[in-house]
């Protein structure tokens, strides 16, 4: 059996409605949760019924150092007209050699927040930006 190919360095390529927003170094919030309603049945003390309910999806936060791709997010925002339309997004986890490790396709995507770098003479930290998007779920790949 060949050894497993584990990703030591991973970055995330993001496209929203086919528009390339560049690569990000961090991606948090690719998750969902099923609300469970518990029902106790009279006379049956052996277990509690757990009924699946609503599915909720968390917002996705993408982070990266400010770079030449930072303007792509601004252009994406500028291309939107009121009211904001929901779109589709594709997030690809990629290895340092450019091969795709995993892909997540999202539906019903809207921007929630963009946060630019916090700059100051007293901070030696790398200037980063964060893009937060909300979505209605995952599409089959």
Image (cartoon, rainbow, N blue to C red):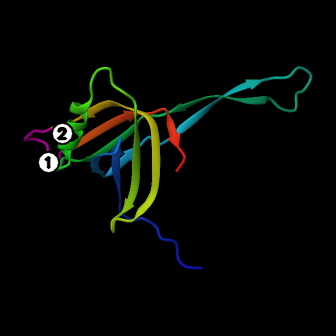
- At 46% from the left and 57% from the top, the residue drawn is 102
Using the image as rendered, state which of residue 95 and residue 79 is in the foreground.
79
Q: Whole-percent x and y of residue 98?
A: 34, 65
Say what secondary structure mark 2 lies in.
loop
Q: Whole-percent x and y of residue 7?
A: 42, 65
Query: Chief secondary structure of the magenta span?
Result: loop
**Residue underneath mark 2:** 117
- At 25% from the left and 37% from the top, the residue drawn is 76
**Residue 48 vertical placement versus 67 (above, below):** above
Number of numbered discs:
2
Q: Quadrant of the N terminus?
A: bottom right
Q: Whole-percent x and y of residue 123?
A: 14, 43
Of marks 2 and 1, the one in the foreground: 2
**Residue underneath mark 1:** 124
Using the image as rendered, state which of residue 21 and residue 95 is in the foreground.
21
Q: Whole-percent x and y of residue 119?
A: 12, 39
Q: Residue furthest right?
A: 43
- At 35% from the left and 63% from the top, the residue drawn is 9
Say what secondary structure mark 1 lies in.
loop
- At 40% from the left and 30% from the top, the residue drawn is 86
Q: Residue furthest bottom?
A: 1
The reply, left or right, for residue 5 in relation to residue 23 is right
Magenta stretch?
Answer: 119-128
The answer to whether residue 77 is magenta is: no
Q: Determine the CA span between mark 2 and mark 1.
A: 12 Å
The answer to whether residue 122 is magenta is: yes
The reply, left or right, for residue 117 in relation to residue 4 is left
Instruction: Answer few, some or many: residues within 10 Å of disc 2's Cα (few below 14, many 20 plus, some between 14 and 19).
Output: few
> Which label number is shown at residue 134?
none
């Amino acid at each position: 059996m060949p050894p497993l190919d584990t990703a030591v360095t991973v970055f995330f390529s993001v496209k929203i409605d086919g528009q390339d927003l560049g690569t990000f170094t961090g991606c948090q919030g690719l998750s969902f949760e099923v609300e469970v309603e518990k029902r106790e049945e009279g006379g049956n003390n052996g277990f509690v019924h757990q009924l699946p309910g609503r599915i909720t999806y968390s917002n996705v936060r993408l982070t990266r150092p400010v770079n030449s791709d930072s303007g792509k997010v601004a252009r994406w925002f500028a291309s939107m007209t009121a009211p904001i339309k929901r779109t589709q997004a594709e997030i690809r986890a990629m290895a340092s050699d450019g091969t795709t490790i995993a892909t997540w396709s999202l539906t019903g995507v809207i921007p929630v927040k963009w946060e630019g770098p916090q700059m100051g003479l007293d901070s030696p930290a790398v200037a980063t930006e964060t893009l937060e998007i909300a979505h209605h779920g995952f599409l089959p790949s």
